[in-house]
Amino acid sequence: MSSQNNTPGLKLNLGCGNHHLNGYLNVDKVGRADTLCDLESLPWPWENNSVQEIVMRHVLEHLGQKSDTFLGIMQEIYRVCRDGAVITITVPHPRSDSFLDDPTHVRPITVNGMALFSKAKNLEWAERGAANTPLGLILDVDFELTDSRFNLDEPWLSKLQQGVLTTEQIFEAERHQFNVVHEIEIVLTVRKPAQ
């Protein structure tokens, strides 16, 4: 781990809306945010390697209708974060009414989609001859997928809790049916070489 982590970094709550977090710089382009910033306007106002944590709760699916803009946002997240920074992303599942009903949602965010930004995964796929787009290598960013959780809709959650359905059955349903999973939580860890 590099020496850039010795001093506390910023904690950003990006696209905060009305969901302000104590101890974070709450950022949005409108409203009563601590800092007003259009996240699609690049570069962002924070210094390289100045951020230790980012929370993006129901915001990433609203950003970057054009692929170049979205990829630029991922590069900005990487630029401002230090090695070891943690990014927590919460998004609606792309096969949920909450994703489909909002006309301002411009792209689905998935666990496998976020894995495309991992250099380790990119190299692993290249070795196997897989056709996955190596965005980590192309963009020179490196986000390790360190956790993901699916928050289930009803009645799926109750059926799982009651033992009526297994986890495997839930995941099979999630692949083929709508409104099984309400939202996805994805945790990424920034990996940067020592400086």
Image (cartoon, rainbow, N blue to C red):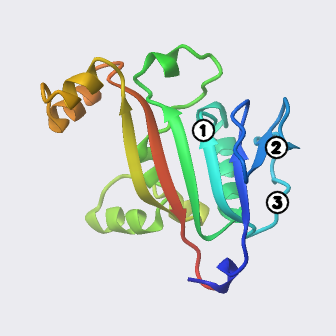
Marked residue nearer the N-terminal end (2 or 3): 2
From the viewer's side, name the closer residue of 193 and 162.
Answer: 162
Rendered location of residue 183, percent (x, y): 45, 31
Marks 3 and 1, how far apart at CA: 20 Å
Rendered location of residue 41, percent (x, y): 82, 43
Marks 2 and 1, how far apart at CA: 19 Å
Instruction: Give amino acid for label 3.
Output: Trp
Marked residue nearer the N-terminal end (2 or 1): 2
Count of marks, rendered view: 3
- Residue 57's mark? 1
Residue at image location 54% in from the left, 13% down from the top: 101
* SS category of the residue bearing label 3: loop
Location of mark 2 (residue): 41
Local crowd size for mark 3, using a 10 Å CA cut-off: few (<14), some (14–19), many (≥20): some
Location of mark 3 (residue): 46
Q: Is residue 151 above or below residue 79?
A: above
